[in-house]
Image (cartoon, rainbow, N blue to C red):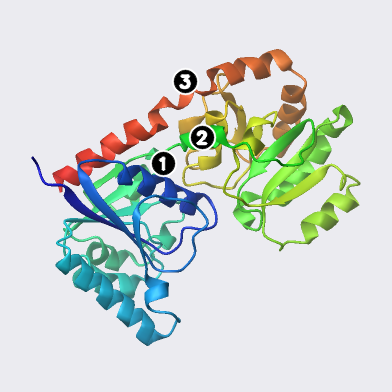
Amino acid sequence: MKPKKRVVFLAYSMSGGGLESQIATLTNAFSKLEEVDATLLLWNNEIGFDSSISLINLELLFPGSSIWVKIKKYLFIKNYLKEEKIEVIIDLRHRTKPWLEVFLSYFLFTIPTIATVHSIDLKAYGFQKKGLVPWIFNQNKHLVCVSNGIENQIRYQFPQIKSVQTIYNIVNASLVNSNILVDLPEKYLLYAGRIHSPEKQVKELIECYAKSQVYKNGVHLVLLGWDGSQMELHQLAKNLEISHLVHFYPFQKNIGVFYKNALFTLLCSKWEGFGLTLVESLQCETPVVSFDCAYGPSEIIIDGVNGVLVENQNFDVLSKVIMELSVNEELLNGLKKNALTSIEKFSEATICKQWMVLVNRL
């Protein structure tokens, strides 16, 4: 019998937005694979999503945030990799400190390492200083991007990096089983994601909703991901006289019920890395409407088949689409019908197979 491949995931957090949700989904998927023995080393004690993977919580072992505590964590990881005979590292961290990453590349990442890139903001993933890129992503590193757009951008800007490919995020099939009781409007449009992040343009989305006047047909706007900040958004809704129609909900684990009962899900970001909420919505058979921003939406949405792809940053067109789609029951039903079949390429079985081909190659 072939021995199991020893794999370690590294992550800072498993609580928050789309990245953290995907960390939980990916590690949970790996925990089911018979050909690997996987463990997650979690830097911070932040767990908002469930995963059945074996987990070592470094903050519980080494509480605090001093430099000495951080050194202890790095030493623990180094010893763990050696003692447990780890064969592959899957690095799911942000990489915002280039000189630290150079050090880690030669101190920790001395075995085959897969470094993931989840955003168009490459500076958050180790690409701040071009001269250091070859040192950070050395011969031990293989890059995995969550969209073709990110992969193409890296290949264009950093041609010295040869080992790079795209593996999409996994759609969380358990979303459809979410049956928690939530007091929701009868008819509503949904936004799910970080409300406080400027690139998500939630302020502009509220204005766009008001401009569409879809509320005259009894259609509300539900914003999922409220963290208590950005109180000016509440004030904006009041100023637009739609505060009774715009609903703010805190982020939660079981969000399928929000998707399943929405007319459609909206995304109007300046940029994305992938657009996970679009896939989650389609998994719940709810159509999607998004700007054709970089990157991800155009790799998920088939315009007129499972949703509507809107000219990038054209809020006037978005307002019209919101109104027209919300009253076109025949079109909505057609988009719903195509939702599930359109995301087969994001299934757990498909994505895990791609991961295992890569892991076994290293």
**Where residue 195 appears, x then y in whole percent?**
66, 53
Q: Identify which residue is drawn at 63% across, 42% down.
A: 268
| Crowd class of label 1 (few under 14; some 14 to 19; many from 20; radius 10 Å) | many
Q: Determine whether label 2 and label 1 are within 8 Å by CB.
A: yes
Q: Identify which residue is drawn at 16% across, 47% down.
A: 4
Above or below 331: residue 353: below
From the viewer's perspective, tell me whether residue 266 is left or right of residue 17.
right
Q: Secondary structure at mark 2?
A: helix
* Residue on which disc 2 sits: 279
Sequence-first disc among 2 and 1: 1
Work out whether residue 1 or residue 148 is closer to the camera in this orientation and state it.
1
Quadrant including the N terminus: top left
Sequence-first disc among 2 and 3: 2
Measured Cα–Cα span from mark 3 to mark 1: 16 Å
| Crowd class of label 2 (few under 14; some 14 to 19; many from 20; radius 10 Å) | many
**Amino acid found under the numbered disc labelled 2:** Val
From the viewer's perspective, tell me whether residue 71 is left or right of residue 232.
left
Q: Identify which residue is drawn at 51% across, 34% down.
A: 279
**Where residue 166 appears, x then y in whole percent?**
33, 41
Work out whether residue 43 or residue 223 is closer to the camera in this orientation and state it.
43
Q: Identify which residue is drawn at 23% across, 50% down.
A: 37
From the viewer's perspective, tell me whether residue 324 is left or right of residue 94.
right
Q: Secondary structure at mark 3?
A: helix
Q: Which mark is residue 341?
A: 3
Above or below 298: residue 226: below
Work out whether residue 314 or residue 98 is closer to the camera in this orientation and state it.
98
**Amino acid found under the numbered disc labelled 1:** Asn
* Residue on which disc 1 sits: 169
Measured Cα–Cα span from mark 2 to mark 3: 11 Å
Residue lying furthest top: 330
Q: Determine whether label 3 and label 1 are within 8 Å by CB.
A: no
